[in-house]
Image (spheres, rainbow, N blue to C red):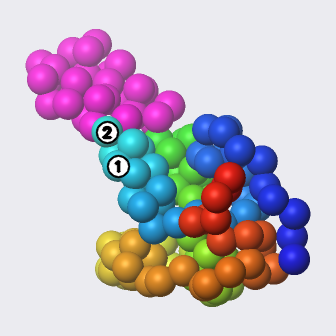
Amino acid sequence: MAPRPGSGMRWLLFGVSGRLSRRTYAWALLFWALVLAIPVSAAVRAAPESSALAMAGFGFILAFLPAAWSIAVLSIKRLHDAGLPGILVGVLIIPAASGFMLLIMMVWPSVKGPNRHGPAPDQAGY
């Protein structure tokens, strides 16, 4: 059994080790959706061919890079919790299957008790 992973937002959003419950996974995805909505809404409000539109595009790129990494590692931890191999995260880059895969990861039940990736996320003190 793997040792208990670190805690905190840095581990949650960017750490690869450990397990993640369905609820925490859904909240983290909602967080990134809201973060990415900020530059998108700025781009929608900007006038065509304005510097505000260019800044919104640049802001989206700056937000997208950490969001993409974070969503990948969140998904790996969620797959570990479900007892599935983390390599399945590769399905998320297939446009036709990514939404379906995210839905599956949100409803797939956790493995009861500890597994090789650590203790179950619903245990006290996790």
Q: Is residue 122 left or right of residue 85?
A: left
Say which amino acid is labelled 2: Leu
Residue 50: image quadrant is top left
Label the magenta part by its dominant secondary structure: helix
Q: What's the CA distance linking mark 1 and mark 2?
A: 6 Å
Query: Residue 107 lies in magenta, yes or no?
Result: no
Q: Position of residue 56 (x, y in %)?
A: 32, 24
Q: Which mark is residue 34?
A: 2
Residue at screen point 47% across, 83% down: 109
Q: Position of residue 65 (x, y in %)?
A: 54, 42
- Report the quarter where the N terminus lies: bottom right
- The foreground one among 88 and 10 is 10
- The foreground one among 123 and 45 is 123
Q: In the structure shown, which secondary structural element does the residue marked by tag 2 occupy? A: helix
Query: Residue 48 lies in magenta, yes or no?
Result: yes
Query: Few, some or many C-alpha atoms within 10 Å of disc 2 (few <14, some 14-19, many ≥20)?
Result: few
Q: Position of residue 103 (x, y in %)?
A: 34, 76
Task: State the extent of the magenta-drawn residues as a range.
Answer: 35-63
- Report the quarter where the C terminus lies: bottom right
